[in-house]
Amino acid sequence: MTAPMLGTTLYSFTNEWVIGRYTLTGLLEEVAAAGIGPGVEVVGFQSFRGYPHLDRETVRVFRDAVDRLGLVPTSLGSNIDIAIRTDRDLTTDERVEYTVPQLEVAAELGFPVVRVQIGADPATLERLVPVAERLGLHLGMEIHAPEGPATPKVLRYRELYDRLDSEALGFIPDFSSTMHRITDGLAETFVDSGLPRDLLDDLQRIWAGDGGQGERLSEFLTLASDAGVDDAAANTVAAAFTMNGHEDPAAWAELMPRVRHIHAKFYEIDAEGEEPSIDYAANLGPLLRAGFRGSISSEWEAHSWTPNDELATADMIRRHHDLMRRTLTEGE
C-alpha cells in the first residue's frame, strides 16, 4: 500500500443504527454509495446480534456484502467488560476467556486488526498474543483520551511490546487524545446543563493548561464554586477532561512502526473544511513522515448531542475525507 486507505467506522452512525434506520447490510450499502469507504470498521457488540458467537450464515452475509460493495474490512472493535460481575473485576483468566472468541470471529469475518482496550491489561494481552499469532491478527491497543502516546498507562504497553517483540501487537491512535480545544458541541451541552456561558473561556483555558486531568478539573470546579455555580452543573464538565485530551500529537511518531490502524476522530467540519478542535496536519503529519501506510477510519462522535432529525452523517464523513485527502496530499 503506497498511501493510507481511508474508510469509516460504523460507530459514526450510532444514532441511525439505534433508531433502526439501517440494517447492517443497509449501512454497508450506505457507506459504499456515499463513497466513504473502502475501509470499513465495525464495533462487534454494536453491530452483530449474539456477538461474538455468530452463526455461519451471519458471517457469510457480512463477507458477501463487503465483497459485493467493494469494501475492505479494516478493524473489528472488541470490548472487555472487566466489571461484568457485581462482586469483583474479572480475573486475568476470565479476561482471556472473554476475549478469545472475539478474536476468532474477527478472523472469520475477515478483519486483519482487532481493537483492544485498556481493560486488556498487560498480563491479559500477553496471554492473547499466541492466539492472535495463530489467527494471523494484529491486536491494536486503542489510545484514546485521556491517555496519550506517552502517558504512564500507555508506556506500560510500550514496554510490554518491546519485551515480547511480536508482530501481533500494535496500537490504534485516536485523535481524541491530541486535541487543541474542547469541541464546541460538547461545550454547549455543559451550558444546556446549567453552566454559565461566560465560564466557557475559563474552561477552555484550564483544560489547555498543565497538570493531570484530575488536577485541572479540580481547578475549574473551584473556580465554578467560587462563582456560585451549582455542583451538578459544574461537574458536567468532567466529560471534557476525559473525552477531549490535549497530549502532544508529535508523539504519535514514537509509536511507529507499531501503528496498525488510526481512529481519525472528528466532531465537526467548519465552513473552511477544517476540524476546529483537532489539527489534522499536526496529527497525521508525524505518522505519515514515520511511514504509516495503513488504514484510517473516520470516527464522527458528535452524535451524542446531535438531534436525530439533524443527522447527516454520511455527508459529514465525506467532508472529513476531503480534509484528510488534503492533509495527505500536503504531507507528501
Image (cartoon, rainbow, N blue to C red):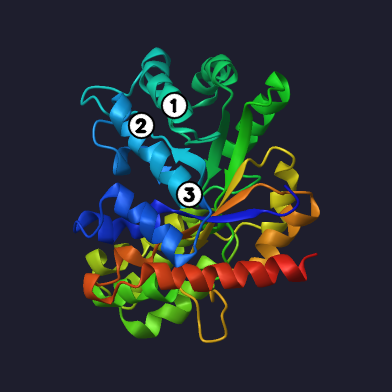
Labelled disc at residue 108: 1
Residue type at tag 2:
Val
Q: Gap in Å between the C-alphas at discs 1 and 3?
A: 16 Å
User: 10 Å neighbourhood of mark 1: few (<14), some, or many (≥20)?
Assistant: some
| Mark 2: few/some/many CA within 10 Å (<14, 14-19, 20+) | some
Do callouts 2 and 1 mark residues in contact (Cβ within 8 Å)? yes
Disc 2 is placed on an element classified as: helix
Label 1 vs 3, first from the N-terminus: 3
Mark 3 secondary-structure assignment? strand
Disc 2 and disc 1: Cα gap in Å? 7 Å
Taking the view exactly as shown, the residue that stands out farthest to the front is 68
In the displayed structure, does residue 152 sit left or right of residue 54?
right
Q: Percent from the top left, x then y, of residue 301?
A: 40, 61
Residue shown at 36% from the left, 16% from the top: 94
* 237 displayed left or right of 308: right
Residue occupied by mark 2: 59
Lower position in the chain sequence, tag 2 or tag 1: 2
Which element carries disc 1, helix, strand or loop? helix
Q: How many marks?
A: 3
Q: Residue at x 72, y 53 (%)?
A: 287
Q: Is 173 located above or below residue 222 in the figure?
A: above
Residue 150 is situated, as x and y percent measured from the top left of the image, at 66, 45
Residue 135 visible, this angle: yes
Looking at the image, residue 91 lies above or below residue 190: above
